[in-house]
Every structure is written in C-alpha cells, then in structure tokens.
Image (spheres, grey):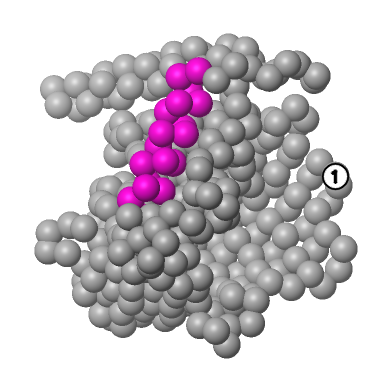
Amino acid sequence: MYDRFASAFGSWARSGILAGACLVMPLLAAAEKPPGAAPVAPGFLDRFQQGFAHTLDQSSRWVDGLFGEERYTNAGKGANGQLQVRTLWQEYQGIRVRTQLRANLPLAQLSHRLNAFIGKGGTDDIVQDKNQSPTGSSDPKDNSWLVGLGYTPPWSHAQRVTLQAGAILRWPPDAYVRANYHYQHAFAPGQTVTFSESVFWKESEQFGCSSSLDFAWQLRDDLVLRFPNWAKISDATSGVQYDSRAHLYQKLGNHRALLYGVGLQGDTRDAVPVRQYGAYVVYRQRMFRDWLTGELIAGATMLRENGWSRRKLSTIVGVGFEMAFEEKHDATGSVLSDRLLRSPQ
C-alpha cells in the first residue's frame, strides 16, 4: 500500500511541477521585451529587488560605520549578489524548494581588502569552493545560513589569494577557516583554463582541501563548451569526493540560452564509487528586468546509494527564478537604486 501511495504521490508531484512549468512558459514568453521597447515603469519587482539590496547594504554600512569617522561618505559598490529560488522534483528525494543566497558586503571604511559575506543553502559547497550544480545542491538537506569575513592580502597579485573565516549557523555551529588560490589563463583566443585550490579547516570535517579545474572553449559566437571538474579530500571522507561535468551553452538570442549537461559524481572509496551519472537540460531567460532570470530544468540520472543492490533511474524536473542585486553609492552616500548590474551566469 505504501508503494502505491508513494507512486501516486510521485505522479501527482510530477504533474504539479509540469503544470507549473506550463504556466511559467507563457510567463517567460510574455516577459521577453521586443528590441527597442520603452523602459518599464518601476513596480513591485523593482521595489522588492531594490529593498532587498538596500536592507543588506544598510546592515554592512552600519557595521562598517562603527570603525570609521565618516559613516556614509564612501563611494562605489555596496551589497551585491544573487538570490535564487528553485522547486525541484527528483525521484527518491521528492519535492524540495531550494532557496540560495550569495551576498557580498564590502567594508570599505574598515579596510578595502576586507568584506563580509552571507550565504544560505549549499553552505558546505561555499566552504569547499564547489560550483553549484544546475540541478541543485549536492546535499538537499544543506539549507543552513553562513556568515563570514573575507580578506585579500596586500601581496596577493590580482587577488589570486584570499582568506576567509566564518561559521555555518546550525546546531552546533560549524566554524571554518579557508585559504584559496585562484588562477585563470587564456592560452588561445576563446580558450581559457581556470584553476582553484582551497585548504580549509572546518569543525565538522577537520582539515581538508579541494581542487577545481575548468576548461572553456568558445566554439562559435553562440556556443561555449565547458568542462568543470572538482575534487575534495578531508579527514571526514573515506576517499576522494569528485564531481565532473561537461556543459554546452547555446545562446538563443534575446537574453535566452540553453545549457546541455552530462556529469557524474561520487567518492572513490565508497562501496559505490560512482553515486550517480546522467544528463540534463536547463532553459534560462531574463524576465521583465535585466536582473531577473527564469529557468526550466529537466534531466535524468542513474542513481545508486550505498546499500542499494542495483542502480535506478531518477528523473528530475523543476522551475526556478534568480534575482541579481547590487547597491550603488555616490560620493555623498545616496542610493542609486536605478543602477543595477546583472551578474553573468
């Protein structure tokens, strides 16, 4: 009886998300502005986006002001980052609503080399310097908050070396410190390689290190091929955790794009070294404003957990929205809310 109920619930869940996707598709189409269209008057979306950035920025400026005589005279960029909401349905995990926040809060008065940051959802990925998967966080239960401070040493050429310290706000709190080295090199027109190495200590894992290697080729003006790879080892892992993918980005024009991806992930010392492998497609389009993006996600993986006797097909469907924000200051500290920057994907 339980199996029949679970099967029925899964069917209802898929039907619900697919119905939601059918509702979102016309919304995406309606959101596409024709070339040369007149600017849209500020409305609820603008007030929400500007208010969200302003609230975060005021918090960082209050803290920054405690260490400076002129609290509101710093010019330049204020709070900036991204807020993402995704609803995903995946077999064997069910429906999950994922909210992810990545916010950078400059502390210019204290030091132009120091910044605060806030994160929510996928916080373990932040500590481990792991890029987010297009189909969601590697740990669906990781929905914690993270706060911390970042510092760029004066001898760090092109800000290649950064230091971080912070805590994941769960019980008990999970404190961490991290040193990161980042290097990017273009070895031919349209061909780049990016390397990142992190050494960290985290209360729940003790010492560990992670490595990222990303190759990118621009095949045509509308096609980019990428191979992002990530690996981690720590005192809490039995072997080497890894995540390796191949992504093809296709620009469709008018702020629309498709991502075709294949990948695999696992742990070399687990009973099942390859936890899952599969393929997925993500459709992304800007909606109403340059800083608001909608997405539709579909895919399938072959999943096998430790203890399972065989590998099982696991389908994935979902919808999502992403809001980029940035607060700007002028020389007198007033807010230039209409100067918004859309961070690239």
Say few, some or many: other residues with alpha carbon within 10 Å of mark 1 (under 14 / 14 to 19 / 20 or more): few
Residue 28 relative to residue 323: left or right = right
Kind of residue sitting beneath label 1: Asp
Q: Residue at x 55, y 20 (%)?
A: 42
211 vs 220: above or below: below
Residue that extends furthest to the bottom in the rendered view of this protein:
155
Query: Which residues are the magenta region?
Result: 43-60
Near-viewer residue (333 or 277): 333
- Badge 1 is on which residue? 221
Give the tally of numbered discs: 1
Q: Where residue 339 sits: x, y (%)?
A: 61, 38
| Residue at x 62%, y 12% (from the top left corner) | 30
In the drawing, does residue 107 fall left or right of residue 260? left
Kindly identify the residue that appears in the image at 59 percent across and 16 percent down.
41
Choose between 225 and 254: the one closer to the eye.
254
Q: Judge by depth and name the residue closer to the eye, 63 or 235.
A: 63
Label 1 residue SS: loop
Q: Position of residue 319 (x, y in %)?
A: 46, 28
Query: Vertically, is 128 above or below 86?
Result: below
Query: Residue 55, position in %: x, y?
Result: 36, 41
* Location of residue 238 in the rendering, given as x and y in whole percent from the top left corner: 31, 76
Q: Main secondary structure of the magenta part?
A: helix
Residue 128, picture quadrant: bottom left
Question: Would you say residue 279 sits in the magenta stretch?
Answer: no
User: In this view of the protein, can residue 32 be seen by the observer?
Assistant: yes
255 in relation to 309, above or below: above
